[in-house]
Image (cartoon, helix red, strand yellow):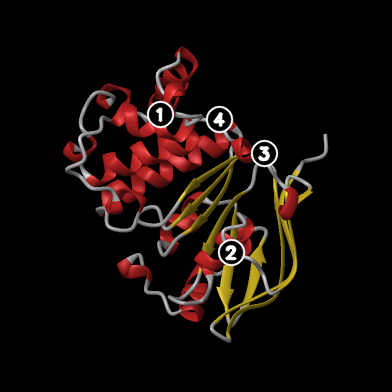
Amino acid sequence: MDKIEVARMEGVYFSYNGRPVLEGVSLKVMEGDFLALIGPNGSGKSTLLKLMLGLLKPLQGRIWLFGQNLDSFRRWDMVGYLPQHAAAAFNPAFPATVEEVVASGYYKGWGSLWRQEVKEAVFWALELVGIRDLAYRRIGELSGGQRQKAFLARALAKRPRALFLDEPTTGIDVSSKEEFFRLLEKLNREQGLTIVVVTHDIGEAFSRAKKIGCVRNQGVYIHEDITEVDQEHIAEVLGYSLRRRC
């Protein structure tokens, strides 16, 4: 059975205040992919992700999600998104429980938050990421790794077919990073969830992802088979140190 095309970009150009960031970028993300986007700071990794989701508009080029032109795409329940610093930006003093935070990802008006279908979706997502037992804890009481799992559950509550994450392990400890990437790998393998993740952690990217996208010099090069990629060489080219795990 042929795989579905989740995202496609053709000839995409983008700049900030006249400074080129991406030039002539073309790529495809297929159903079941686990694509890690790596590259130096300021290379355009997060910009690329935001363009895929319509959060930024390209100067030139075309973008599709699930075979539909992004301008007319409306099936956002098929897409989960975990933005950069989502957990860190959340005010820990805000008196919301983990259940309430995750339920907000299923939002269809305030009256919908307490419907049975929402509750079932919330606890399904919490079970999936392994923190069902934390449902009634205040979000501000969680560790950084636990909080990030809660926001991952929020992105999963609508049972999307593709998940886009922008540097999801920034600001959490090394063991929590490893656990988070193992969880992403499990979601990809067992749930068939398509994953696109921007990361500085090149070690975890090569350990868990199926494909690597190197973003550099306003372009993107996709390595379809990472078993044939020299990790040390890629790290050197991108200016990473494997010892510090980016």
Between 111 and 94, the one nearer to me in the picture:
111
Q: Compared to 232, does 103 lie above or below?
A: above
Pointer 3 residue: 75
Quadrant of the frame with the N terminus:
top right
Density class for disc 1 (Cα within 10 Å; few <14, some 14-19, many ≥20) is: many
Pointer 2 residue: 56
Q: CA distance from mark 4 to mark 3?
A: 12 Å
Q: Secondary structure at mark 1?
A: helix
Residue 67 pos. (x, y %): 78, 47
Quadrant of the frame with the C terminus:
bottom left
Q: Earlier in the sequence, mark 1 or mark 3?
A: 3
Q: Earlier in the sequence, mark 2 or mark 4?
A: 2
Give the label, 4 or 1, closer to the camera.
1
Q: CA distance from mark 2 to mark 1?
A: 26 Å
Between 162 and 2, the one nearer to me in the picture:
162
Q: Earlier in the sequence, mark 2 or mark 1?
A: 2
Residue 63 pos. (x, y %): 73, 59
Residue 25 pos. (x, y %): 70, 72
Pointer 4 residue: 159
Task: Determine the residue positioned at 23% across, 48% down.
Answer: 91
Q: What amino acid does circle 2 point to?
A: Leu
Q: Secondary structure at mark 2?
A: loop
Q: CA distance from mark 4 to mark 1?
A: 12 Å
Q: Earlier in the sequence, mark 4 or mark 1?
A: 1
Most extreme residue toward the bottom is 18
Q: Secondary structure at mark 4?
A: loop
Query: Which quarter of the figure has residue 138?
Result: top left
Q: Residues at badges 2 and 4 in contact (C-beta under 8 Å)?
A: no
Task: Determine the residue positioned at 40% across, 61% down.
Answer: 201
Q: Which mark is residue 103?
A: 1
Density class for disc 2 (Cα within 10 Å; few <14, some 14-19, many ≥20) is: few
Density class for disc 4 (Cα within 10 Å; few <14, some 14-19, many ≥20) is: many
